[in-house]
Amino acid sequence: QKEVEQDPGPLSVPEGAIVSLNCTYSNSAFQYFMWYRQYSRKGPELLMYTYSSGNKEDGRFTAQVDKSSKYISLFIRDSQPSDSATYLCAMTPRTSYDKVIFGPGTSLSVIP
Amino acid sequence: KAGVTQTPRYLIKTRGQQVTLSCSPISGHRSVSWYQQTPGQGLQFLFEYFSETQRNKGNFPGRFSGRQFSNSRSEMNVSTLELGDSALYLCASSLVTSWDEQFFGPGTRLTVL
């Protein structure tokens, strides 16, 4: 079993839809959770990060963490064609110099 | 400020050859991490360098190696290339640790024939 699992894609939604992207993890030591977005032919870029269980909002994006279930989600409201990209969850214990573990990514297409 | 640069952007090699990839981090960033990205496995951590020392290593064979120079620029080397080494190799720089915000380069697309 991989340390971080992510919903397989590709995911295709109409413009304006609410998108839910999800990851599960097995290592209870993970304390710091991130979402990266990767456009085609580009490197990933950090979208959001959170330390604690609960919700964190940033514009149309909401990151949700449930440590008891080892489950994190990213919600995108009013999705736009420019949101079409691969979304990667990432996490780390954030102690000493721990490495960051990435999920395999979910490819999202928002259709105009 | 200038972003992370990686050279070359594309490489085609044959099995058994070796290859060296280069990464120039953002000015002031001292941590450089390398990742391999493939459709099947996603983004897998290769190693991290800080102050010219390897600080962390992923589960890759010894054919994969790297180094960091005093100006924080980093190189990774793959010897005795195998078909399965075909991937996008991404370099990420961050201020001090790999869990500070990582800024990724565009990657080097390596194809092994």
Image (cartoon, grey):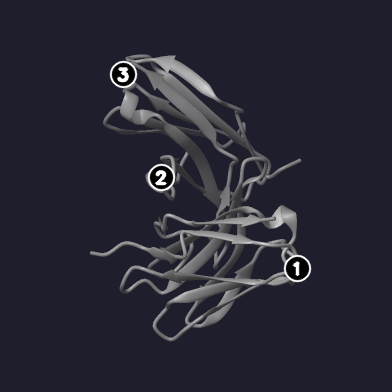
Taking B73 as reference, is A85 above or below it?
above
Q: CA distance from mark 1 to mark 3?
A: 50 Å
Q: Is residue A89 left or right of residue A57?
A: right
Q: Give the spatial CA distance, label 1 vs label 2.
A: 41 Å
Disc nearest the viewer among 1 and 2: 1
Residue B75 sits above or below residue A100 on the image: below
Q: Do the residues bearing badges 3 and 2 touch, measured as CB atoms within 8 Å?
A: no
Q: Residues within 10 Å of mark 2 (few under 14, many from 20)?
A: some
The quarter of the picture where residue A16 lies is: top left
Up-down: is B102 above or below A108? below
Q: Which residue is mark 1?
A: B16
Quadrant in which the C terminus of chain B is drawn = bottom right
Dot 1: chain letter: B
Q: Which residue is mark 2?
A: A49
Give the residue pinned by disc 3. Answer: A78
Q: Secondary structure at mark 1?
A: loop
How far across and how far down the image is residue A42, in percent?
Answer: 41, 47
